[in-house]
Image (tube, rainbow, N blue to C red):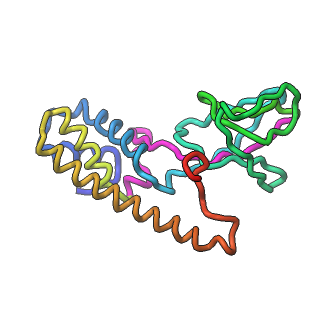
Amino acid sequence: MAISTYDELKAAIATWAHRTDLTAVIPDFITLAESRINRLAKIHNREQEADLTVVVGDRTIALPSGFIEPLGLWLTYYGDRQFVRYLTPEEMPVFDDRGQSDYWAIDAGNIAFERPADIAYTFVLRYTGLLTLSDANPTNWLLTNHPDLYLHAALMECAAYIRDLELLGVAKAAFDLALQEINDKEHRVDSLVTLSTEISSGPRRNILTDT
C-alpha cells in the first residue's frame, strides 16, 4: 500500500490496526502524531522563511502561522541581510525613542524589539514550521520521504485509544528507530556544514538552544 497522501495514511492506520470502526477518530491520531513529530524530529525541510515588516511606531510583529521555533532574524537592506541578535524578554532593554533595533525577542505570539521603529523596516525570519496534514493539505515532504515515521506515530496514538498494549509497543519501537535514523541523517548534514566553516560564514545554529 502506498502512503503518500493524507487519505492513504488514514487507510494505512486502519489496516495496520486491523480496525474498521475508527474512521471518525483517525484524523485525531494523525494530529497527535504530528504534535509528537513536531517536538522531536530535527528536520531541515521543516525550516521556512517569512518576510516581515514592522509598522512605523510599533515595536512588535506577529509571528507567522505555523511557527514553532526561531532560527534567526535578519534586517534587510536592498537585498543584503544584517543579523539581529536574539535576547530573552527578560534580558532585552526597552526604550521609548524610535529607531533601528539591535535586538529582538519572542513575546507571546509576537516578535518584540527594544524600541519602536522610526521607518517601516523589513526583516527575514527563519524558523521551524509545523507539520499539518489535512484534506486541504494532503501531503508534505516528511510524508513523501518518511511515511513510516508518520504511520508509527499515529499507530501509537491509535493503540493508546483502543488500549492495545502490544500494538503500542510495536509502534513505539518502530517510531523510535525511524526517528533516530532521521535525526542521525540530519546531524550528518549539519556536520558537513561545520566542516565548511573555513570558507563560509559558519554552520546553521539554533539561536535558542545552541551555545
Question: Could you say which quadrant of the image residue 32 lies in?
Answer: top left
- The quadrant of the image that shows the N terminus is bottom left
* Magenta segment boundaries in residue numbering: 119-144
Answer with left or right where residue 170 lies relative to residue 74.
left
Answer with left or right where residue 35 lies relative to residue 7.
right
Looking at the rendered structure, the number of numbered marks drawn on it comes to: 0
User: Closer to the camera, 133 or 116?
Assistant: 116
Residue at screen point 78% across, 29% down = 94
Residue at screen point 64% across, 36% down = 88
Q: For residue 42: magenta?
A: no
Residue at screen point 58% across, 49% down = 48
* Residue 76 at x, y percent in the picture: 79, 49
* Residue 37 at x, y percent in the picture: 38, 46
Residue 165, compared with residue 148, is above or below; it is above
Answer with left or right where residue 38 lies relative to residue 10.
right
Residue 193, compared with residue 167, is above or below; it is below
* Residue 103 at x, y percent in the picture: 75, 40
* Residue 185 at x, y percent in the picture: 42, 65
User: Closer to the camera, 208 or 133?
Assistant: 208
Residue 74, compared with residue 103, is above or below; it is below
Question: Could you say which quadrant of the image residue 2 lies in?
Answer: bottom left
Q: For residue 135: magenta?
A: yes
